[in-house]
Amino acid sequence: MLASEIELVEFTPAHLEGALMLSQQAQWPHRIEDWAMVLSLSRGVAAIGHGRVVGTAMATLYGDDVATINMVIVDEAMRGLGIGKRLMDFALDAATDRECRLVATQDGLPLYEKLGFRENARIVQHQGQIAAISAPQGVEWATAADVAEFAALDQAACGMNRRNLFALLAEHGRFAVIRRNGHISGFGVLRSFGRGELAGPVVADNAADAKNLLSFLLAGREGNFLRVDTYDDSGLATWLTESGLSHVGGGIAMTRNAAPRENTTIHTFALASQALG
Ligand SMILES: CC(C)(COP(=O)(O)OP(=O)(O)OC[C@H]1O[C@@H](n2cnc3c(N)ncnc32)[C@H](O)[C@@H]1OP(=O)(O)O)[C@@H](O)C(=O)NCCC(=O)NCCS
């Protein structure tokens, strides 16, 4: 197949099956539900060759000013032909003049650097079978009414207005919360993803609270498969490893057109996913 025979079209639910085959080929763990969740928050593009999906990319739009670029994959037989660049041009157009963020693999790094993305953090991926963990004091399950506050706290931590994502998480996830003096001071979310479950976002004032939120989410789930994507300076690595979640890889967090950000006292300790930030 020649690169000139590849047509780029808007990604629709009809492309999900083909996209799933690509992510499986790249050994990503996504289920079709995981693709569908990202699509429902995004504008995407599919590269079609001989009626088959041979490439994908999406821009997930948060509020008016930020997008995450994700699900960038080209069929391994079609790489090095400029398809990745064409997909990225579409995703960046969909993101208009927003700040764009992504988590790069080693494969994607050269392409993103050429497009003006710059490294701003390192992501570490921990996963495995959860060890026996007991629920800590001071954490409880959240109520539906808390979710709007979580979105505000999340925005303070990461600078993205992700109310659209939180509306979905409220349907699909379970939220743990820490309250202090009548205020919410941290929360964490657990949901199904990939080979099992994923914990994130986890937003808290400090690593001790983040650990307690995670412990609460993990308690009683011994033996279940769980994934956590965190920052290399989160202070959680040793505890995650002791809890059965080995360090299995990671990625490079990059931004383009980054807006200056104020220092905050609240921080993101685990991502919603590498795709969603
Ligand atoms: C990343 C990926 C999408 C790139 O797709 P592609 O179609 O091969 O990329 P292109 O052919 O458009 O290349 C774009 C540019 O990056 C460069 N590039 C691509 N892969 C490269 C590599 N492995 N090493 C060095 N440069 C590379 C190309 O030379 C090209 O630069 P140029 O335009 O100056 O020649 C593809 O490698 C892939 O699907 N990898 C597996 C999934 C993945 O990791 N995706 C990234 C997620 S963050």
Image: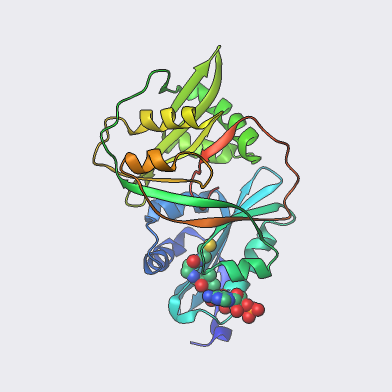
Q: Quadrant of residue 149?
A: top right
| In this view, 33 is above or below 188 | below
Q: Quadrant of residue 87?
A: bottom right
Q: Nearer the viewer, residue 104 or 30?
A: 104
Q: With 215 as the anchor, is 263 left or right in this view?
A: right
Q: Check the image and name the residue furthest to the left.
A: 223
Q: Quadrant of ligand 1?
A: bottom right
| Residue 231 appearing in the image | yes
| In this view, 261 is above or below 28 | above
Residue at the (57%, 69%) spot, across then down: 9
Residue at the (70%, 52%) spot, across then down: 99
Q: With 274 as the anchor, is 197 left or right in this view?
A: left
Q: Position of residue 139 (x, y in %)?
A: 42, 21
Q: Check the image and name the residue furthest to the front.
A: 238
Label total for image = 0
Q: Position of residue 212 (x, y in %)?
A: 42, 27
- The colour scheme used to paint the residues is rainbow
Q: Check the image and name the residue furthest to the top.
A: 181
